[in-house]
Image: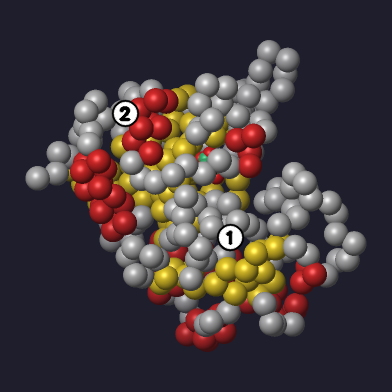
Amino acid sequence: MPRFEVRPFGDVLGADIVGFPFDDFSQDDVDEMRRAWIEHSVVRFRDTDIDDATQIRFSSCLGPFVIHPRQLQQGKHTGHPEILVISNKKKEDGSPAGDLGDGEVRWHTDTWFKERPPSAAILRALEVPPTGGDTYFSSMYRAYETLAPELKKAVEGRSIHHQTVYDGRGEIRLGMSKPESDDVRTWPGVAHPIVRTHGESGRKALYLGGSPKYSWIIGLPLDESRAILDQLWAHVANPDFVWRQVWKKGDMVMWDNRCVMHRRDSFAPDAIRLMHRTTIEGERPV
Ligand code: SIN
């Protein structure tokens, strides 16, 4: 018998996990929760009142940690290297005490520019602004299932070249330099299939990565690739398959990076938002 309750939000994505025993959970409890997560793609724990060590112990039951590149920069947690700090807080010297500031974060999947993007991200709210900073999750299973037939046919068996030079904000990544040519097809990058099959659920999901700007559908002329990518990116924001998380302090949300995209609203610069995220290794998309 599970030691907690699963309350789905609807038939597209998301469920509340109510009563998870954070004080004394076992690997069996996490495995049971994982089954609900695979079914619903996003799960939320409310009023958690847990500390960093408990978030890390819980996360470690899901697989090895990924150290996000930003964890080595402004998202660094001083005590726990497993945690990425997402915040607009400032240190005493005025430098950022967390990553992503107070701005909007556009639709993306996490770390799509790696050969093996993460499977899970677990985000816990320590401080939340009175309004704004909501996070939205879009089901890429549903996005795939509802693609127009001609678009489905156009992307079948195709992959995207995800360049690794610029990040989602258009800044040059650590260790990279401005390419000599404007032709994105010559830039360093990784290729991932546009439609991936989830390794655990066996379902097909659309997989667009994190930034439409410099992506290229391998093998297509650039203008044709651009036209298709624009249609695909417009499709993922369809409110029919988007769920919105309005954060409360103590909420912890875990999403499946293999089958959802997410984005975040901006919030007032004079409000404080502080989130701690752990990220779990995934497999190469196929
Ligand atoms: C992210 O992981 O993209 C940030 C999500 C958020 O701050 O709500």
The mark closer to the camera, 1 or 2, is: 1
Disc 1 crowd rating (10 Å Cα; few below 14, some 14-19, many 20+) is some
**Residue visible at 24% across and 26% down in the picture:** 23
Nearest the eye: 140 or 72: 72
Nearest the eye: 61 or 197: 61
Disc 2 crowd rating (10 Å Cα; few below 14, some 14-19, many 20+) is some
To which residue does mark 2 refer? 48
Instruction: Identify residue type, mark 2.
Output: Thr
**Residue visible at 67% across and 77% down in the picture:** 218
**Residue visible at 58% across and 52% down in the picture:** 111
Instruction: Identify residue type, mark 1.
Output: Glu
Q: Is residue 212 above or below residue 79?
A: below
Question: Can you give x and y, in whole percent of width and height, for residue 282 in the image?
Answer: 46, 55
Q: Is residue 184 above or below residue 137?
A: below
**Residue visible at 70% across and 82% down in the picture:** 220
Q: Quadrant of the N terminus?
A: top left
Nearest the eye: 254 or 28: 28
Q: Is residue 243 left or right of residue 5?
A: right
Question: Can you give x and y, in whole percent of width and height, for residue 172 in the image?
Answer: 78, 48
To which residue does mark 1 refer? 115
Q: Is residue 227 above or below residue 24?
A: below
Residue that sits furthest to the left in the current view: 1
Question: Can you give x and y, in whole percent of width and height, for residue 31 in the image?
Answer: 25, 47
Residue 47 lies in quadrant: top left
Q: Is residue 31 left or right of residue 125?
A: left
Element type where label 1 sits in the image = loop
Residue that sits furthest to the top in the current view: 92
From this viewpoint, is residue 272 visible?
A: no
Mark sitting earlier along the chain (1/2) = 2
The residues tagged by marks 1 and 2 sit, at their Cα atoms, a distance apart of 33 Å
Residue 35 lies in quadrant: bottom left
